[in-house]
Amino acid sequence: MQLHVLSLNRINELITKKEISAEELTKAYLEQISRVEDDIKAYVTVNEEEASVRAGIPVAVQDNICTKGVKTTCASNMLANFISPYDAVVVENLRKAGASLIGKCNMDEFAMGNTTEYSAFFRTKNPYLAEAMPGGCGCAAAVAAGEAAFALGSDASGGIRQAAAFCGVFGLKPTYGLVSQYGLITYAPSLDQIGPLTRDMTDLALVLNIICGRDSVDSGKGDADLPDYKKHLVNDVKGLKIGVPIEYLNTVKAPRVAAKIQEAIRKLEELGAVCEEVTMPHAEFALPAHCIISSAEASSNLARYDGVRYGSRVESPDVLNMFKKTRSQGFGEEVKRRIMFGTQVLSTGCYEQYYTKAMKVRTLVKNDFDLAFEKYDCLLTPTVPATAYKTGEKALAMYQSDFCTIPVNMAGLPAMSLPFGMAENLPVGLQLIAGHFNEGMLLRVGYTLEQNTDQTRLRPDISGL
């Protein structure tokens, strides 16, 4: 039995029945990491010692989620040697539930990007095709390649969902405030949310049950009553009304990707759902508005990394030059680009012209969703307009690929990406969006698709890497 390819739900069953031990499971995952990690490069840090001693269900977390006693680098030279003195709340919850940290996943520096090419260390490879992008973190690649049973990532512009789409796994961005941000080193706190990446729908529900919960230390934490998300794994969409935003569909130029989206729509209709086109008139403005807001927040948040309060210090004869050298050498080009842009839009003369207008657009985008959910139970879109793009295509493609995911972050909504077949030998991602704190609807629709089609059951052949 290949333990490293089993779902979390199946692993729990086997451990409960004492057919396998946690030690055997951990050994299987560490052996898989030893086999493939040199090719995949999903991890900045492999936590072999703790995983072996603690022997729980192996989980990977993105390297901007704090872990006590283990490096948390944000894939940046600025934090290359930072060891957190505490665990993020989500990591505490996982450890209490019997998980063990097997490693910290690579990412774009401070999560600014969706390729891992902006990591200060190396680029992670897509398990389906080495030249293809894995998304903005190595979490999805680790899950797809059997290097972790599941993973936690962060999503400020679609990071979890895009990585899931590119690597053929399931990824969920919860409602803003449903999961504690405490211990997440985020560059844009009003947009970011921690969420799970798994191999199937049942695993999403299991992990969501663990990581959700009220948290008095997190000012962004919501107070909604928390259901048992496993109860929403219902194989039935009869009578549900699903909106299909035409603005999102029109971004898809690849014929095979468009065909897969239409196939998913037809399948839901066959199963009894009503699918109708809907318009989201302000969708096209979400991308530039998000760029302004996120860069402004990055400019403010990353100001603390100066070599005195936080971050590695580059010594210099005087304080001013020390600040300059520390930030110049500690931050990569993409981070510096966004900091400078954010500082500009917050400056006198630009604040009203850019930042204030962007915040108004954010409200309009949220209103579009509010109107849509008055009529529809959920929305269906592509996760990204195409399959994973290749090395060297990053500049324009990186920003364009955010078109379908960014509005969700602007509105603070829950959204999920699930794999739906292949195009050009790479996975296609299908995105479902629901109203605030309605993760249950996403699980219901996604589970129904999973149970009635083989399009969600993808596994890469990594033997040739």
Image: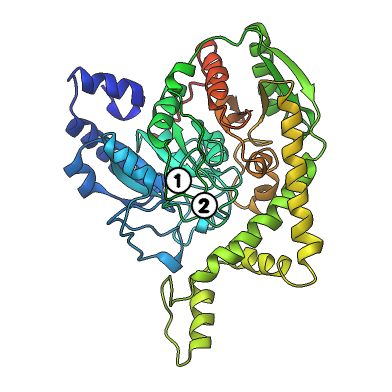
* Residue drawn at the location 24% of the way across and 20% of the way down: 14
- Residue placed most toward the observer, 26 or 396: 26
Q: Position of residue 131 (x, y in %)?
A: 54, 45
Rendering quarter of residue 132: top right
Q: Read off the residue under disc 1.
A: 138
Tell me which amino acid carries mark 2: Thr
Q: Secondary structure at mark 1?
A: loop
Q: Compute the Cα span from label 2 to label 1.
A: 8 Å
Specify the quadrant that holds the C terminus. Answer: top left
Q: Is residue 56 toward the left or the right of residue 420 in the image?
A: left
* Residue drawn at the location 75% of the way across and 53% of the way down: 358
Q: Is residue 278 toward the left or the right of residue 36 in the image?
A: right
Q: Position of residue 318 (x, y in %)?
A: 48, 91
- Residue placed most toward the observer, 29 or 277: 277
- Residue placed most toward the observer, 105 or 39: 105
Q: Position of residue 101 (x, y in %)?
A: 30, 44
User: Can residue 407 be seen at all in this image of the molecule?
Assistant: yes
Q: Secondary structure at mark 2?
A: loop
Specify the quadrant that holds the N terminus. Answer: top left
* Residue drawn at the location 64% of the way across and 18% of the way down: 264
| Above or below, comparing residue 78 to residue 197 in the picture | below
Tell me which amino acid carries mark 1: Gly
Disc on the earlier residue, 2 or 1: 2
Q: Read off the residue under disc 2.
A: 116
Rendering quarter of residue 247: top right
User: Can residue 425 be seen at all in this image of the molecule?
Assistant: no
* Residue drawn at the location 36% of the way across and 64% of the way down: 82
Tell whether label 1 touches label 2 (CB within 8 Å): yes
